[in-house]
Image (cartoon, helix red, strand yellow):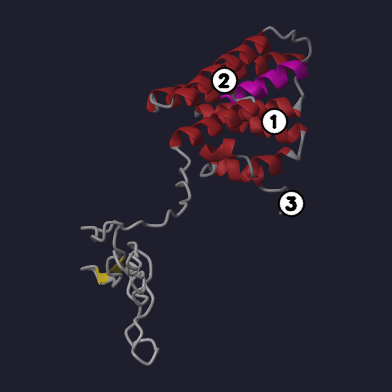
Amino acid sequence: MASKSKPKHVSRPAAKPAKQARKVASKPGKLTGPAKSKGGKASPSARKIKGTPSRTPVKHPQGKASKPSRGGKLPQAVNKIKPMVAQKPPVRPISGAVKALEVGIKLMYAEQYDKAIKCFQALITDFPDEVEIQASAKANIHACEKKMHDRGRTIIRSADDHYHVAVAFLNGGQLDSAMTHLQQALKMEPKGGHILYAIAAANALKGNKEQALSFLKQSIHHGPENRFHAAQDNDFAALVEEPGFRELLTTPGK
């Protein structure tokens, strides 16, 4: 009879070990949970950030706190950025060339072409760097010369025509040309008080005091209103101190 074999000992699987707290490898920059004490309460220690540099601001030597760079290092210098402030462009003062040009243009509009030409020529000499103003002055000189040329070609038929041309020459300072036309006008109208008055003014401007007083006396005889005109006319400034001039300005009976 076969002997009964003892059952083989079957080893039981070992008991599972107690559960251990899983370790979680904290990645840099992530928060780990607070450590628990035996009582299950969180430890008083605050959460820590791993792999992150300190954020404590560091004061700049000038007193301003500067932020750390990404690598955790502070920049060596902090550049100041000044706010951009819009500035008004400086007001450019009116130059002497502009003023001289305006004077010449006024003389040209007053038909004093001879004086206007002299003014423009002086402007060109005194302000060689003002290119645009010089170009304008040269153009105005040509315009004045053309006006004077056209005036010379005007057909003069009457005493008034001669008189008006003479007045234009007087205003331009061309006394000899003015006197020529006034003499032609006087031949056509010997008793013209306005013509005699203009001849007196031309002589006064030329310094011929005796002739100026003589023609002024005749002009007042034919036109009594010329007495008051002469008292306010700067053309007779050279005769102010002359006794004969004062007598002519005195109204008869006073």
Quadrant (top left, top right, bottom left, bottom right) of the N terminus: bottom left
Tag 1 residue = 218
Q: Name the N-terminal-most of marks 1 and 3.
A: 1
Q: How far is the residue under mark 1 from the one under mark 2?
A: 40 Å
Tag 2 residue = 140
Kindly state the secondary structure of the residue where label 3 is placed.
loop
Which three-letter amino acid code belongs to the residue tagged 2? Answer: Asn
Q: Is 11 one of the magenta-colored residues?
A: no
- State whether the magenta stretch is mostly helix, strand or loop: helix
Placement of 120 over or under 229, stated as above or below: above
Tag 3 residue = 253
In x, y percent, where is residue 43? 34, 87
* Front tag of 1 and 2: 2
**Residue 237 appears in the figure:** yes
Which three-letter amino acid code belongs to the residue tagged 3? Answer: Gly
**Residue 211 appears in the figure:** no
Kindly state the secondary structure of the residue where label 1 is placed.
helix
Q: Is residue 154 left or right of residue 240?
A: right
Which three-letter amino acid code belongs to the residue tagged 1? Answer: Gln
Q: Is residue 66 left or right of residue 76?
A: right
Quadrant (top left, top right, bottom left, bottom right) of the C terminus: bottom right
Q: Residue at x 77, y 24 (%)?
A: 191
Q: Quadrant of residue 223?
A: top right
Q: Is residue 98 left or right of residue 171?
A: left
Q: How far is the residue under mark 2 from the one under mark 3?
A: 52 Å
Q: Residue at x 50, y 20 (%)?
A: 135
Q: What segment carries the magenta color?
A: 159-173
Front residue (pair 157, 108): 108
